[in-house]
Structures are given as C-alpha cells and as structure tokens.
Image (tube, grey):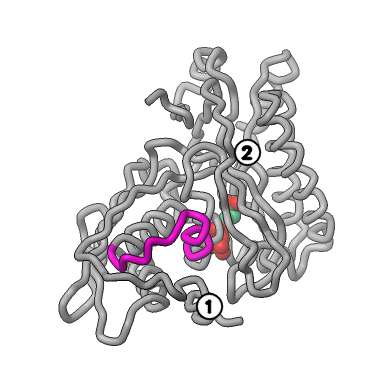
Amino acid sequence: MTRQKFIDQLLKGSRRKPGTRGEAFAPANIALCKYWGKRDAELNLPANSSLSISLGKLGTRTVVKFAKNADRIFLNGKPAPKAFTRRVLAYLDLFRKKGQFFEVRTKNNIPTATGLASSASGFAALIQALNELMGWKLRPRELSMLARLGSGSAARSLYDGFAVWHAGQRPDGMDSYAEAVDSAWPALRIGILEVSAARKEPGSTEGMNRTRETSELYQAWPAQAACDFDELRAAIAAKDFPMFGKTAENNAMAMHATMLAAWPPLCYWKPRSLALMQKVWEVREYGFELYFTMDAGPNLKLLFLENDARTVRKLFPKVQIVTPFPKA
Ligand code: DP6
C-alpha cells in the first residue's frame, strides 16, 4: 500500500470545513524500549513495539496557516534551514490539495544543545496543528498513525507521560498506532547528559536500515524488544524502579550491540559517552539506583527517582533534570 492510499483511507469521511489556523504543542519523548528497524519503509511500520516517556513541557509548538503563493517554513523565528524545510515540505505534500500552500512556524523550547530537539515532537505538533487547520477532527490514535509517516518516534509524542507504539501486524498498517499508558509516576526523573550537540550521523532511518540489513545480531532484537516491552509495562504498573531501570538500560545496550555488529559498523558513542556509562555502573556497584538509556546518538539520559536528585547533581554537575510528570 502507498502512503497516499493509507492517508486517503484514514481521512475518508473525516474531511470537514478547513479553519484558518492550527496550533499545537507536542512533547519530546525518550524511548525506554526502542523502536529499531522497520517492517515496511513506505508506511513506516516498525519491526517491534516501543515504549517511551514524554518530557512534559519540553517540546515543540507549531502554528500552521494557509499561505498565498508559496510555502513558508520558519524554525525558532527564522527561515528554517534547508534540510528541515525539505523534510517538512515532503510531509506537507502528503496532505495538500492542488494549489494549496502553507505557512509553518515551529518553535522548540528544548535547548538545542541537549541534542534532543528531535523530529518526534516536531511531526507530532505539526500533524495536530494540521488537524485543526484542515478541520479533520481526527482522534489522537489516528493522528499518531499520520505522525508516524513523518518520523516513527513522533507517533509517541502525541501523548504526555508514558506512551506505547504498537508494531501491529497488518500489512496496511492500520493496527500500528500509539496510545497513552494510563500510569503516572511523579517521582520519576530524567537527567540529560549532553556529550555532543552535533547532528547524529548517520540519521536513525539509515542507521536502523543498515543494522537490519547487515547485522547478524539484529535477528535477536525483535524478541528482546518484545520481552522488554512487557517487562517495562509491568515495572511501570508496579512502580518497580530497579526493574524499570534495568530493563530500559539493557534494552538500549542491546540496541547499540546490534549496531556495533552492522557493516560498516555503527557506533554513536563518543569516548565521553563510555566514561559516563562507566560512572553510572560504578555508582550502581555501591547500591545507588541509577540507570541510563541512549538513542542513536552520544548523549545519555539518566533514569532515577526524586529522592536521589541531589546526589545525581553532585555526581554529574552538568546534568539537566527533567520532571516528566510535573504537578499541575
Ligand atoms: C533510536 O523515529 O527518528 O531514537 O522513523 O526513520 O524517522 P524514522 O526514525 P526515528 O527513530 C528513532 C530511533 C531511536 C529509538 C526510538 O525513539 O524509539
């Protein structure tokens, strides 16, 4: 099935009167059980289900309007860089009618230096803003399927707190959507440790494709991911932090192991990433409940509980601490 057919099917019967403006905010998210590998590139369907935590007020705000003669794309108040513009336009092309143009204004409140200003919150905000502008009145589940076409991890950024993205099995992708996990964990903290703010190379899409095609270890990945997905859900339901942290960290390490066994090898770590990992392992030897996760990049995201925040700050003075379940 083509993207266009998929979109037509989702929008069938839901085209209402377009408005004049759409605006939305979407949080950034960090995967605890990673999405790594596609079962269908055209529909951007994942090989495995994934689970994430959203970063509360850190994310992307986007305003979309109709424009007269040409598209206009802005990022943080300035005309957006070429690569960004190209990706947004390719996505808008999926939805525009002939002769229709858009003005898109996007702002990230994630300090770009954290290396977290990802496409996930961007596409999640954009599709929600488009939903309002076009008057589709789609629900989050359907919007997550459309966000996925921009970037897989964007499906999970439709929600606050924990979110799961079901891999699904259907070739038409209609069972591959994201939904919220109805479980708050106010004591949970995430610590962002920046190693490098440079753009990751290669990007996730190429990284996961290369891994899937060339890494022998990738064969073990879907089964491990399925197991970790269930364990994480159980750990969240039981608020079992050691099980939660261990499963998330192990899942990240297993994903990176599949990459190391790819050809040419993929290693997103920098020497400092490894030094930080070793520091986490060392303090854990002394019984301190601290874990980490890492995406396709060199930065670490620490996982710990509120009561340990002071110690984490002492150990890692540059850490940026995020409260994913802020008090209202
Ligand atoms: C390692 O969502 O960026 O961050 O669907 O090709 O755009 P595309 O990939 P993307 O991949 C994210 C990979 C990851 C793990 C995760 O977020 O689940």
In the image shown, does 87 or 211 lie closer to the viewer? Answer: 87
Q: Quadrant of the N terminus?
A: bottom right
Secondary structure under tag 2 reads strand
The residue under label 1 is 3
Which stretch did the figure color magenta? 133-147
Distance between mark 1 and mark 2 Cα atoms? 32 Å
Q: Position of residue 197 (x, y in %)?
A: 44, 46
- Residue 2, above or below 157: below
Residue that appears at 65% across and 50% down: 50
* Magenta stretch encompasses residue 171: no
Q: Position of residue 89 (x, y in %)?
A: 35, 73
Taking the image as four quarters, which one is ligand 1 found in? bottom right
For the stretch drawn in magenta, the main secondary structure is helix
* Magenta stretch encompasses residue 134: yes
Q: Which mark is residue 62?
A: none
Residue 181: which quarter of the image? top right
Secondary structure under tag 1 reads helix
Extreme residue toward the front, this view: 13
Q: Does residue 201 appear in the picture of this structure? A: no
Q: Which mark is residue 293?
A: 2
Give the residue type at disc 2: Thr
Residue that appears at 75% across and 41% down: 230
